[in-house]
Amino acid sequence: MSTLSVVTDVFLSKREALAQLEVVLNVRADRRDPTNPYLFMPTGTVLTIEVPKFGEDLPLTLDLRADIPHAVLVEQAESLAKQLGDDLGWSCIILEGQPE
């Protein structure tokens, strides 16, 4: 399983971020666990949203994980970052995790 994070420059609640991501990515969030909704991307990648804990001044982070080669996940993250920049004006930095 490969993982990585896409750190944005926005400060949104998880609910606000989900709403925007659903529209831009044209996917519906799975909210069966309301404390940890996720987006299941058409590529098979799972996107979860990390929000800062109370009192932390950190931007919204999107965590990606998939059972694919790490290099492919990096390409997907780069594409996602570009789309978020183009469609929402978000700046993104990709923090690469290591393949598990």
Image (tube, rainbow, N blue to C red):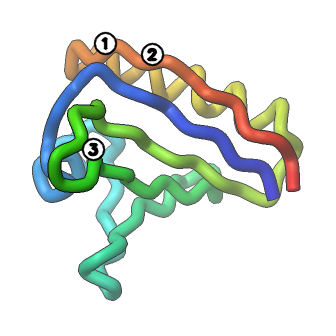
Q: Is residue 22 depicted above or below 98 in this figure? A: below
Point 28% across, 20% down: residue:
9
Q: Where is residue 11 in the image (x, y as percent from the top left)?
A: 17, 33
Give the secondary structure at mark 2.
helix
Q: Mark 2 points at which residue?
A: 82
Question: What is the residue that sits farthest to the bottom in this orientation?
Answer: 32
Q: Residue 86 carries which label?
A: 1
Task: Kindly report the distance in space between the C-alpha atoms of the residues bearing marks 3 and 1.
Answer: 13 Å
Identify the image quadrant of the C terminus: bottom right
Above-or-below relation of 63 to 36: above
Judged from the image, the secondary structure of the residue bearing numbered disc 3 is helix
- In the image, 3 versus 74, the foreground residue is 3
Discs 3, 1 touching: Cβ within 8 Å? no
Please, what secondary structure does the residue beneath circle 1 have? Answer: helix
Q: Position of residue 21 (x, y in %)?
A: 27, 44
Image coords of residue 76 (percent x, y)? 63, 32
Judging by the rendered image, the residue that carries numbered circle 3 is 21
